[in-house]
Image (tube, grey):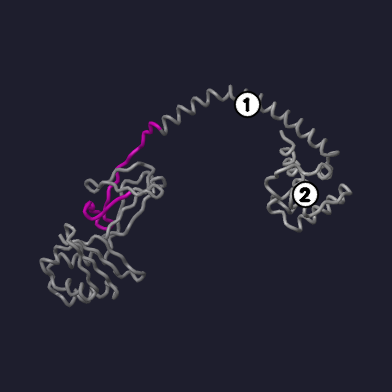
Amino acid sequence: MTDLGVFYELKKSVLERYKTRYSYFEEDWKKFSSQDILNLIDDIQETTKNSVSEKWIYTHLKPESNEKLPRKDMLDIFSVYVGKKNWNDFKHRFVTEHKRISKKENVISKINAKILIVPFLFLLLFLLWKFVFPIKERRTIELNEKYSNDSISSRKVKAFTIDDTVVTEIEIKNSKIEVEKDEKVVVKSPFYKEKTIDLQKTPNIKKIELEPDDYVNILQGFIKSDIKDWKTRKEQLDRILDDNLEVIVMFQNNLGAEYFNKEEFSQKVIIPTPSLKSLHIVAVEKNKENKIIFIRLIKK
């Protein structure tokens, strides 16, 4: 080891010595304050009967790296401060101990290498089996409506798995999804309240029950029904739609879209028409008062 390398060890020893004298200090040289420097100067004076300057400490002890070795007389002072006769004594003891430890570590490393080689091979085989050729357990989960217990059509809901920030849609077949046992599943729909299931926490779940969104289902019923009681419709729409409602109706084949406010949309829904029945809700947003503030529909 170079003399500069040994000096870094002396800096560590000085810091450890300071911590034994001032036990409240638990930081490194970077956090060494001006008051800590004054305390160190006093402690060195008391221990070695020699003086050091604040500038010397700022220049040589506080920096993380040093370009050159300080003067030997200063190294002698700090070596005495940590309990050695002088710099040569500190360096000799450290280098000797370093060689002894290195030799011991080399012997231990060789022994450990021989001892660990067999478990390492078993670990390697296990990792290959687990990560390169994983056998993932899968399960089938049914999607049901909470109150009626009816199966839910794939046209009304979408299911996704979430892995950190990666969201992947899952195919829904016969109102069922197939997922791996440790995945996180989210089911979304404008007609049902969103539901998230962590299969690591509930690995034995066989059914996901979705709670209907009453307001959205009422609205969809108005769009598809032949009810002629326009006064009742108007009153109910006023209760479930926010005054600042925005409605976007998308046309198929990229033919554009129409925009409606609350009054315009309510007027359209109050009186059933063939055109109204061709609308299908695809997205809904609500405000804090649970009123519908945004609707996106597709005209089929």
Please state which amino acid type lies under the numbered disc 1.
Ser
Q: Quadrant of the N terminus?
A: top right
Magenta part of the chain = 132-160
Up-down relation of residue 27 to residue 266 (above or below): above
Q: Residue 128, located in which quarter of the rendered image?
A: top left
Q: Is residue 201 left or right of residue 36?
A: left
Q: Residue 146, located in which quarter of the rendered image?
A: bottom left
Q: Position of residue 197 (x, y in %)?
A: 36, 50
Q: Is residue 102 left or right of residue 194?
A: right
Q: Position of residue 5 (x, y in %)?
A: 71, 38
Q: Is residue 151 magenta?
A: yes
Q: CA distance from mark 1 to mark 2?
A: 34 Å
Of residues 190 and 296, the one drawn nearer to the viewer in this rendering: 296
Q: Position of residue 279 (x, y in %)?
A: 17, 63
Up-down relation of residue 16 to residue 254 (above or below): above
Of residues 67 and 113, the one drawn nearer to the viewer in this rendering: 67
Q: Is residue 105 left or right of residue 143?
A: right
How many marks overall?
2
Q: Quadrant of the C terminus?
A: bottom left
Query: Which of the numbered marks, if any, corresponds to residue 18?
Result: 2
Q: Going 34% across and 46% down the picture, which residue do you hit?
A: 205
Q: Going 21% across and 53% down the picture, which residue do you hit?
A: 155
Please state which amino acid type lies under the numbered disc 2.
Tyr
Q: Position of residue 231 (x, y in %)?
A: 17, 77
Q: Is residue 176 magenta?
A: no
Q: Going 37% across and 48% down the picture, which residue do you hit?
A: 166
Residue lying at the far right of the rendered structure: 49
Q: Going 89% across and 49% down the picture, which residue do you hit?
A: 49
Query: Which of the numbered marks, if any, corresponds to residue 109?
Result: 1
Element type where label 1 sits in the image? helix
Question: In terms of sequence position, does the residue under pointer 1 or pointer 2 come before the other?
Answer: 2
Q: Is residue 239 left or right of residue 14?
A: left
